[in-house]
Amino acid sequence: MLQRLFKFKGGVKPATNKAPSVQAPLRIAPIPPLLVVPLHQSIGGQPTPLVEVGDRVLKGQPIGAADKWVSAAVHAPTSGTVIAVEERVAAHPSGLLTLSVVIEPDGQDEWIERHSLDHASLEPERVREILRDSGVVGLGGAVFPSHVKLTPAASVPMDELVINGAECEPFMTCDDLLMRERAEGIVRGVAIFRDLLRPKRVLIGIEDNKPEAVATMQAAVEALGENFEVVAVPTRYPAGGAKQLIRVLTGKEVPASKRSPEMGVQCFNVATAYSAWRAIAFGEPVISRIVTLTGNVEQPGNWEILLGTPMQEVIALAGPKADTNRFVMGGPMMGFDLPDLSAPVVKATNCIIAGSPTLFPPPAPEMPCIRCGACALACPHELQPFELYWFSRSRNFGKAQEYNLFDCIECGCCSYVCPSHIPLVQYFRFAKSEIWSRERDKNMADAAKARFEFRNERDEREKAEKAERLAKAAAAKAAEKKPDLPQAAPEPVETPTVDAEAAKKAAIAAAMERARLQREAAQPKNTDGLTIAQRKEIAEIEKRRAPLQAQQQAKPNAEGVQTQNSPKDQQ
Amino acid sequence: MDFITPPYLTQNVSVRRVMLQVLAALIPGIATYAWLLGPAVLVQIAIATATALLAEAAMLKLQDKPLGPFLGDGSAIVTAWLIALAFPPLAPWWLIVVGTAFAIVVAKHLYGGLGQNPFNPAMIAFAVCIVSFPALMSQWPPVNAQATFVDQLVLVFGQGPRLDALSGATPLDTLKTALKLGEGSTSVATVTADAAVFGRIAGHGWEWVAAGYLLGGIWLWGRKVIGWHVSMSFLAGMTIISGALWLWNPAHFANPLFHLFSGGSMLGAFFIVTDPVSGCTTPRGKLIFGFSAGLLAYLIRVFGGYPDGVAFAVLLLNLCVPIIDLYTQPPIFGMKK
């Protein structure tokens, strides 16, 4: 299998530090005494809670339902009792709270009823629904709901399906271990994606520092008789970025302004493919993931950990050394300090690194930029980071956007090579969030202005119409007073007036109806976002109401119709 | 716990490291210089370094900036060394003090300090002094002057008479003057036949100093401290114009090799136009910057009134940097035609 590889510009080669965590095989972490499962674990909408305090849940039971298309369900990682549905600390640099379901495991680990399905016998739309309801999201760290990415573009044929096993972040080995130990499941999962997207070729890219993974994946592909190409790609950070891997394997460059299916290519992480296969073939939703525990610990390694396991439980598995002063979630290039160790493992948690002052020394003081251009050479998106830095620093956000700020993937290569130790990525994040917040403000102001202008216009129109009506009435009166005028004259005038009046009324009615529909579509209904208690209450009221309504419908009268209509009018 | 923002890993690089490597790359040239022309240049380097550090410290103090990191970054020392190498080695001590102080105080700090100067500070020092003290800036010792170190020190620090034997024109200047005085009767070949002033390819002895800079430059390129774009295009610009004129009239125009190894060509190509702060940053911009500077340097040194043109060429191109950069922004990932 000879595959022509392409190069992406830039990139860096930090020490990989992967060896310590691949010595031991994959281990299954024990069930912790308490699970805190955040409902919002993927890009998109926040799933609505399906359980309330006191409920007994089974392993794999949905506890949060996808609230819209770009969203994914969340499940109970084991059987037990819901002891709280409340705001808990999120695994996020901000340390903000997020609505979470707290489950006390009963130790029985009792599954819900599972159905084993064959995706080939299902409608593609049904497969996507199952994936959404099984909570399958990008496990590379981006946690984008996978079913959304599994819809091919209507206009562009799908050329390549790229499967990402590159794992370019130093220290991280969760995908490596998964490929070594569960290659067959990955390949079967890839086959599901292949059947949904129907690409011409399937390319599995793995960095060449993982020869064992390349070999096991190749063997699995052959054993299953698939024609997927397993390709070892040069080890260079960020070769595992979706856009970089697509570039290396296909030569296509997906700009920030486009989605990859528009260019006939789609990319999934190996762990995502594996979880998709478990979801379809075993009916197992995503309730655990493989996490690399490494860095300044006694026992580095990879563990399959239930989602919702608090970080302190996880860290105890690896045994941090005495001088550990921080825990980083994610890799050392794009990860972040965990603000609170009570935060739980979520679908995005691919790696936890115990840091020490020797492992991650404090940064040298920031010096002025000397425009040496090292960052521009390192940027995989071929941006001019030092120019972006000047513009971000001086809050010249328009210029920053002109210099393609939003093409920055925040990979950290520029900061890595900067001789002045400037935290460039932070400047870009700052600029991006400032631009976003300004845009939000502007949109709100625009909407308010549009409302105001519409109202003024309507007032003007109504005034004009009133004046017209009055004038017409006056004219009619004047006409009545002069009966000696020839009869033929007013008639042709009269007929169109009536017609115009009727047409106008119809148009107004139609416009009002459109506006009402739009309002209903745009505004959240007051039945959305309710707590479980409120929903139960509503259900009870509805139950009481049902016989009454049936009675009313049996003998319809004017009163009954009015009662039925009244809530609508109020809205 | 220290506050660290990702990435947690950084390459072992710093401004100080970059500057130290530039200083190290100057050593072959300086060693040859001191060997062939006496140790006076080392004295000038010492004076320039002391002046630069003092001026830098004073300016930092005035701005309430920390002395440690900024004095330690080595940028002022690089400026000082380049000034010392661009100035005549036997110039009186105060000349280099004036030049260096002007470079650090005005050209660097009044524009905002490290990273903010639009002009190359060393070239500003040269330009200011050659305009203000043209005679002193034009007295260069011949290689075979046989002056002892003491003689040189007397010239640098003393108030004694400036001996003609120890101060002549540069080979470039000598050639230009001879050709001008000869008014067509002399040719380049007859002028450069004088072995006291001219060597195999350029100035006697000076050609070896230039070779030392070239060596250092290649080392810097190998260490990836400088890129090839700007140095190569500078040399290319100078080669093309000098080659064209030489082919057209070899009696009146020296060959490209003579120009590449004369005056400030090699020092300029690897240590001056490569200054990242005052130079272009885009690949195409660097090519335009280097090529134009090489071309201009040749035109000024051959047709202008000054003995060399590198300084003025670089300063003029420094002025053009913003517009060159603006129009040479490279296409980004996914947006190439």
Image (cartoon, coloured by chain):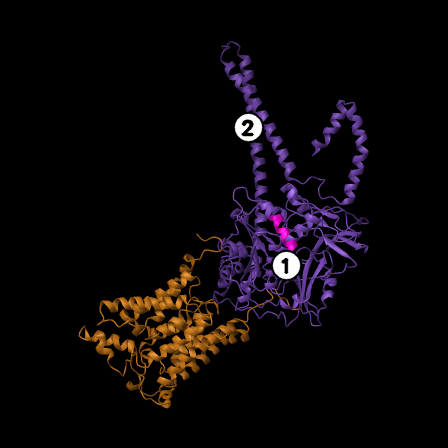
Chain colours: A purple, B orange
Nearest the viewer among B170 and A493 is B170
Marks 1 & 2 on one chain: yes
Nearest the viewer among B57 and A132 is A132
- Residue A441, image x and y in percent? 59, 48
The chain that hosts pointer 2 is A
Q: Is residue B330 left or right of residue A350?
A: left
Which residue is painted at 35% across and 65% down in the image?
Answer: B291
Nearest the viewer among A244 and A178 is A178
Task: State which tag comes first along the sequence, 1 or 2.
Answer: 1
Q: Is residue A392 above or below residue A440?
A: below
Q: Which residue is mark 1?
A: A179
- Residue B145, image x and y in percent? 31, 87
* Residue A25 placement: quadrant: bottom right
What secondary structure is the stretch in magenta mostly built from? helix
How far is disc 1 from disc 2 in space, using C-alphas?
74 Å
Can I make out residue A281 in this image? yes
Q: In the rendered structure, which segment of residues is drawn in magenta?
A: A182-193
**Element under label 1?**
helix
- Residue A145, image x and y in percent? 64, 49
Which residue is painted at 27% across and 83% down in the image?
Answer: B196
The chain that hosts pointer 1 is A
* Residue A568 placement: quadrant: top right
Q: Which residue is mark 2?
A: A464
Which amino acid, mark 1? Met
- Residue A257, image x and y in percent? 52, 49
Q: Does the magenta-highlighted stretch encompass residue A199?
A: no
Which amino acid, mark 2? Ala
Q: Residues within 10 Å of mark 2 (few under 14, many from 20)?
A: few
- Number of the label disc, if any, that sits on residue A428: none
Whether pointer 1 and pointer 2 mark residues with C-beta atoms closer than 8 Å, the reply is no
